[in-house]
Image (cartoon, helix red, strand yellow):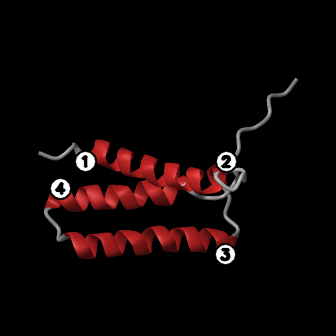
Amino acid sequence: MSAPTVTAALVGATSGIGGGVIRDVLPREVPLVLHREIYALPAVLGSTLIACGHRLGWPLPPTLAVAAVLVAGIHLVALWRHWQAPRPRRPRN
């Protein structure tokens, strides 16, 4: 029995983001996910694609390949175009 699609997508996104945080914390750097960089959105989209593909019975290797290209593509385009995640506004005094 597999997990519900939403749960699987959230667990996948969390593990992808968590892996990146660990990668950055070990060399004592501030994690990229805490910067303005687009980081979480590709992880959520990729894990959602894999979870939905599994639910729909798509073959795993092509689904993984498409998800990897999607995640890497969004991340690279975001770096190239200098896209940044929105930051919360400072409260006015």
Q: Which residue sits at x=30%, y=44%?
A: 6
Q: Amino acid at mark 1?
A: Thr
Most distant residue in the top direction = 93
Image quarter of the N terminus: top left
Contact between marks 4 and 1 (CB within 8 A): the answer is yes
Q: CA distance from mark 4 to mark 3?
A: 33 Å
- What residue is disc 2 on? 34
Instruction: Give the numbered dot on residue 80.
Output: 3
Indicate which label's residue lies in the foreground, 4 or 2. 2
- What residue is disc 4 on? 55
Q: Amino acid at mark 3?
A: Trp
Q: Residues within 10 Å of mark 2 (few under 14, many from 20)?
A: few
Q: Which residue sits at x=68%, y=58%?
A: 84
Q: Amino acid at mark 2?
A: Leu
Seen from the viewer's position, the closer of residues 24 and 61 is 24
Q: Is residue 85 visible?
A: no
